[in-house]
Amino acid sequence: MRTPNRRASIASAPVGTQPHRGLAWGALVLAMAIWAGGFFVNKEILKTLTPFSALSIRFFIAAAVLFIPVLKRHGLRLLKRDILPVLLTCLLSPIAHYTLSMYGLRMTSASHAAAVGGTFPVAVCLLAGLAGIESLTPKRLAGVVSAAIGVGVMGLIGSEGSAASIFGDGLILIGTIVCAIQIVWLKRIFRRVPPLKFLLYQLVIGFAVFTPAAAIEGFASVAQMTPIVMLEVAYAAVFSTVVAFGLQYFALQRVSATSVATSSGLVPVFSLLLEVLLLGLMPSLLGRVLGALFVVAGIVLTQSAEGRLFGRWRRVPDREAARAGVRNIRSHQNATRLRI
């Protein structure tokens, strides 16, 4: 019996078990659009509720929505080796990230917060490279720097001014790094824990931490909730939390952590479009369009470093997945030889 051609054997084995990357990027774009719209909703919610009260109620509703589907599909049990990583990752974000960002924004200007927060894709790229998960190629680095510049420009131009402080900027930076660590860590966690199951734990732990914090703030604002505010909180819980995070985690399983981080630059781009289309605002439009172009250029550069955006099979962007793919191919070849 003739030995199968090695090239044909390798070609027949998929370079990953994921759908093509176009679907993942569609999920990312939709998630960023939802978060951009959620920004305006959250501003309205915070006119009535205190920050921790809003987060507590939002996480409770989102966890209630996810509980039955996750219970039926995945169950609630975690393996012993997964308990500590899941717990630590949930503490990083939303708890540490949200708290640091909120208090940092109170102590610095919105423009400084936007500029510092724009370093998120750079932080993810560097951390993924240092962890050996993704390679630090020139195109990838150029892409994340371009996206960071775009986010910074869009935040600096037309932003409300207030007193800035080094301490406030430092809190924003630490919160950004914390979120970057979580995104990189999730690449490994999602190999054993389904994304929606992780999201449920994230919501439950967040609710358990934010509720006592809301009690310290006082629940007087909750009594002032109107039906409109309740609908806004429900929107934030279902769409900005369950749907948007679900889409982002879906994409994180299929594209690199750097790509996911770079896509976050689309949030201010969509916010700009909503300001123009829905509110009729034209705040420093030329400068902010320039920032948006930097973001888009960063996404294009990042993707060109990882293969075609709409390729049939994704080109595995992380080294561990690539090594796993090589092992699978070799196992397939060895099994073929044994049958022969």
Image (tube, rainbow, N blue to C red):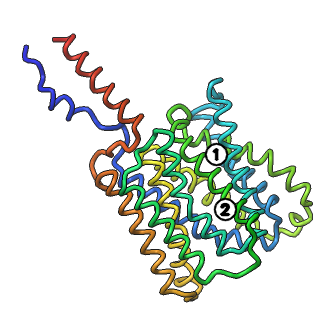
Residue in the foreground of this view, choosing between 44 and 134: 134
Residue in the foreground of this view, choosing between 296 and 23: 296
Q: The N terminus is located in which quarter? A: top left
In the rendered image, the vertical position of residue 214 relative to residue 84, given as above or below: below
In the rendered image, the vertical position of residue 36 relative to residue 144, given as above or below: below
55 to the left or right of 8: right
The numbered mark, 1 or 2, whose residue comes first in the sequence reads 1
* x and y, in percent, of residue 302 in the image: 38, 58
Q: The C terminus is located in which quarter? A: top left
72 to the left or right of 60: left
Q: Image quarter for residue 309?
A: bottom left
Q: Nearer the viewer, mark 1 or mark 2?
A: 2
Residue at image position (47%, 57%) is 28
In the rendered image, the vertical position of residue 246 relative to residue 273, given as above or below: above
Label 1 sits on residue: 66
Outermost residue, left side: 2
Q: Which mark is residue 236?
A: 2
State the CA–CA distance, disc 1 to disc 2: 14 Å
- The amino acid pointed to by label 2 is Ala
Outermost residue, front side: 166
Residue at image position (30%, 52%) is 307
Residue at image position (69%, 54%) is 97
* x and y, in percent, of residue 22 in the image: 35, 55
Q: Image quarter for residue 143?
A: bottom left
How many numbered discs, if any?
2
Residue in the foreground of this view, choosing between 63 and 288: 288
* x and y, in percent, of residue 281 in the image: 58, 88
* x and y, in percent, of residue 235 in the image: 66, 63
Classify mark 2: helix, strand or loop: helix
- The amino acid pointed to by label 1 is Leu
Classify mark 1: helix, strand or loop: helix
